[in-house]
């Protein structure tokens, strides 16, 4: 009995380690950015959000594929019957024609219409919205992809990232569902900034040459507000990698930091700490009962929640 228990425990540990190794932060970032758009599409067309997200992750390598980067094509849809812009890419054959879109929103919208209006996919719409396994297998059976493991890959992604939880969603954030996915870059020739979510807020990372004005043009939030949300002056010079929040920051860090403190290390400042946790600088001083002239000192421990 004891040997069986140890063996079973080792099996559980091995399984957990394998699952952890498969988890990909880039995939999670993609899901966070597009989940609201997937939910919006589900409510409009009846396609499970989990299926849309899993297909997007798989087909576009979480937005990193050439088709997604250069053509905003997140679902690998080819040009059959297409009259819009195109991008050429090697797939089953050399130089195949794929659809290209102005924005990610257009790709998600066309994907939904492609399934909804395609005769071979009609049976899928008789399935329950929560039957993601039926949808995944039905897509493969209908010829959506040539990969023999396509359905299994979608199911694995849905289960690993718990995408099925979005299939019962009744609400979504319109900013992420529409605004940030319909926008075009403020500077022609540059891709849109990736939007992340953290501590009930949205943020992006500044790139070289960014200013509050250029970011404001892209996200359609005034430069004055962006500077205020980030507790900076509108004319401040942004550095590559600077975190720029798109809404007013919270007073406390996320719940995961309950009972935990920040250990000040070399290079930290009160401002950089506040930005890291997505909290207001004033609140960081207040919860630690610090004078306004306090400077972060290596080794100090600061409450963030």
Image (cartoon, rainbow, N blue to C red):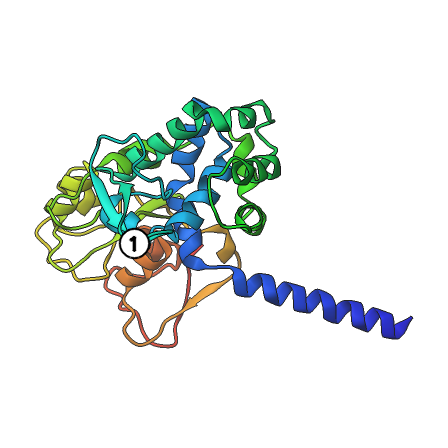
Q: Can you say which quadrant of the picture contains the N terminus?
A: bottom right
Mark 1 neighbour class, 10 Å CA radius: few under 14, some 14 to 19, many 20 or more = few
Q: What residue is at 31 percent from the left and 77 percent from the top?
A: 266
Residue 66 left/right relative to 9: left
Q: Residue 86 location, x and y as percent?
A: 22, 40
Q: What residue is at 49 percent from the left and 28 percent from the top?
A: 120
SS for dot 1 = loop
> Viewer-proximal residue, 136 or 167?
136
Q: What residue is at 46 percent from the left and 64 percent from the top?
A: 261
Q: Residue 199 location, x and y as percent?
A: 41, 48
Q: Can you say which quadrant of the picture contains the C terminus?
A: bottom left
109, above or below 100, in the image: above
Q: On the image, numbered disc 1 is attached to which residue?
A: 94
237, above or below 227, in the image: below
Residue 223 left/right relative to 169: left
Return the residue found at the far front.
Answer: 93
């Amino acid at each position: 009995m004891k040997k069986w228990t140890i063996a079973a425990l080792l099996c559980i540990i091995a399984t957990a380690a394998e699952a952890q190794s498969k988890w990909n932060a880039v995939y999670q970032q993609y899901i966070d950015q597009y989940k609201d758009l997937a939910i919006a599409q589900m409510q409009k067309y009846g396609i499970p959000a989990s299926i849309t997200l899993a297909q997007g992750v798989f087909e576009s390598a979480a937005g990193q594929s050439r088709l997604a980067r250069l053509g905003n094509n997140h679902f690998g849809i080819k040009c059959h019957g297409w009259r819009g812009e195109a991008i050429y890419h090697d797939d089953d054959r050399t130089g195949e024609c794929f659809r290209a879109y102005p924005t990610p929103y257009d790709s998600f919208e066309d994907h939904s219409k492609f399934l909804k209006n395609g005769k071979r996919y009609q049976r899928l719409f008789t399935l329950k919205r929560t039957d993601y396994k039926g949808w995944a297998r039905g897509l493969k059976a209908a010829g959506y992809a040539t990969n023999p493991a396509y359905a299994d890959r979608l199911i694995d992604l849905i289960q690993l990232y718990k995408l099925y939880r979005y299939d019962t969603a009744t609400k979504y954030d319109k900013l992420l569902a529409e605004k940030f996915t319909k926008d075009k870059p403020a500077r022609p020739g540059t891709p849109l900034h990736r939007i992340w979510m953290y501590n009930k807020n949205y943020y992006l990372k500044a790139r070289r040459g960014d200013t509050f004005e250029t970011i404001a043009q892209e996200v359609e939030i005034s430069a004055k507000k962006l500077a205020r949300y980030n507790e900076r002056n509108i004319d401040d010079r942004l550095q590559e990698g600077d975190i720029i929040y798109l809404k007013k920051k919270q007073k406390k860090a996320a719940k995961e930091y309950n009972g935990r403190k920040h250990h000040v290390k070399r290079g930290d400042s009160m401002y950089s700490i506040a930005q890291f946790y997505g909290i207001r600088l004033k609140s960081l001083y207040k919860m630690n009962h610090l004078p306004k002239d306090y400077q972060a000192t290596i080794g100090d421990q600061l409450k963030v929640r």
